[in-house]
Amino acid sequence: MRIIATTDAGFDSQLARITGRMELQERSQPPAVQRKTIEVFGKPLTPSEVVRTIVADVRERGDDAVFDYARRLDGQTIDAANVRVPQDEIDAACQRVEPALLAALQKAAENVRRYQQHILTPEPPPLSVAGRTLISRYLPVEVAGIYVPGGLAPYPSSLIMGAVPALAAGVKRVYVCSLPLKDGSMHPAVLAAASVCGVNEIYRVGGVHAIAAMAFGTASIPRADKIAGPGNYFIALAKKEIYGYADIDLFAGPSEILVLADDSADPSYVAADLLSQAEHGSMASAVLVTTSAALAAKVQQKLHEHLAALPNRDVAGRAMDEYGAAIVARDTEECIRLANRIAPEHLEILLEEPEKYIESITNAGAVFVGPFTPEPVGDYIAGSSHILPTGGTARFFSGLSANSFLRRTSIVKYDKAALEADVDAIAAIARAEGFHAHALSAEVRKK
């Protein structure tokens, strides 16, 4: 982790390098990905070209394309007979997982359900003025497809964070797509999480082809009205490609955390919290913004100590080397301005009297307040979803919630007197726009 100051020459360019990881633009691929691209497609392709090719193929060939890419990209042998996980496999998974894990998943699902039901957008009362009545009606989408990353490691928490808000919103059909393990089976923790949520429709397929299948529907995988869930760079590009054929939640890319801290913060806490996101992958971003150069130095030392004890120290260490930083600001006000400028996925406030700064934070996916609210409480158990905007998109995206699965319909009713009061205004605007039949539609009712 480098230590930089806002007064350093070239500070802006250093900040851009640390935080600008997730723009949805072309980027060079690792050699292994380049080789795989040539092997599968017969020529080198950019990430966007890969995504467009797969999406177009799945749209045209449906199941055949999905199963073909599962074999060529993921090494999986699936077909219409085994792509959906049977109920007996789900039931067996609940018996296989450790009782403590099952209890934790049940607690997480209940906490998320309680919070999501609490924040559901209430329908306002009808607005009635002089014979005009307007009603806002909120309805859930009918089908939601939840994408859960898989393959190398299980992410049962992501299943809960995606499926429970949809169910709390009243979505009638919620299903999951997730990449299976190498042997084609689904990780029992993922299936157990689905079970405690009440989801029994699970498809063992992941990647861009899964996103395309959810967007267009195939013979085996239903078309979803809304697709939600985190993923890698290719999943983000796939969501961008299919947006409009289905709705999406947001672009959730490499994980990130920003910790606001001063001399009152425990350096060990800060270092551990930074590592909690750095271990997500080598492109994760972990940033400390502080008024104290002394704290930054202490956190740097604690990072080395914590890393030495981590089994996955290589992944977390690479992320801290590439996208980790301690930024020393002039004062607390500059710290707040930087935090809002970066607009991180997760933001922790470890300042003295942290509650008084909450309203100053305007751009963040989720905010964690005080020394006893480490970011992992949001990842797993608090009740808010951990599917959050990244890469600065918290400036205009919100985290996933039950409200994300609602559509709003406006219902309008005029009586005769109300229409006669507005008909001349309607006709004037319509004719100004060249829409004479619009004017006629209103005027024909005028007596």
Image (cartoon, rainbow, N blue to C red):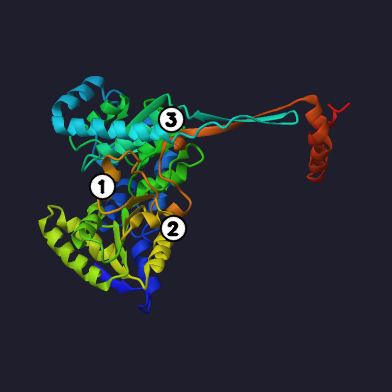
Please provide percent x and percent y for residue 116: 39, 34
The structure residue drawn at horizontal position 79% and vertical position 43%, both measured from the top left corner, is 429
Count residues near mark 3 (Cα–Cα under 10 Å), then give few for <14, some for 14-19, many for 20+: many
| Residue of label 1 | 376
| Residue of label 3 | 169
For marks 1 and 3, the one nearer the N-term is 3
| Residue of label 2 | 360
Viewed as shown, does residue 297 lie left or right of 173?
left
Above-or-below relation of 129 to 28: above
Q: Amino acid at mark 2?
A: Ser
- SS type, badge 1: helix
Question: 419 and 393: which one is in front?
Answer: 419
**Res 163 visible:** no
Above-or-below relation of 16 to 359: below
Q: Amino acid at mark 3?
A: Ala
Please provide percent x and percent y for residue 40: 31, 46
User: Which residue is farthest left?
Assistant: 309
For marks 3 and 2, the one nearer the N-term is 3
Quadrant location of the C terminus? top right
- SS type, badge 2: helix
Quadrant location of the N terminus? bottom left
Contact check, label 3 and label 2, Cβ < 8 Å: no
User: Which residue is farthest top?
Assistant: 88
Work out how far the residue at label 3 is from the one at label 2, CA to CA, in angstroms.
Answer: 30 Å
Please provide percent x and percent y for residue 376: 26, 47
Label at residue 330: none
Viewed as shown, does residue 343 lie left or right of 274?
right
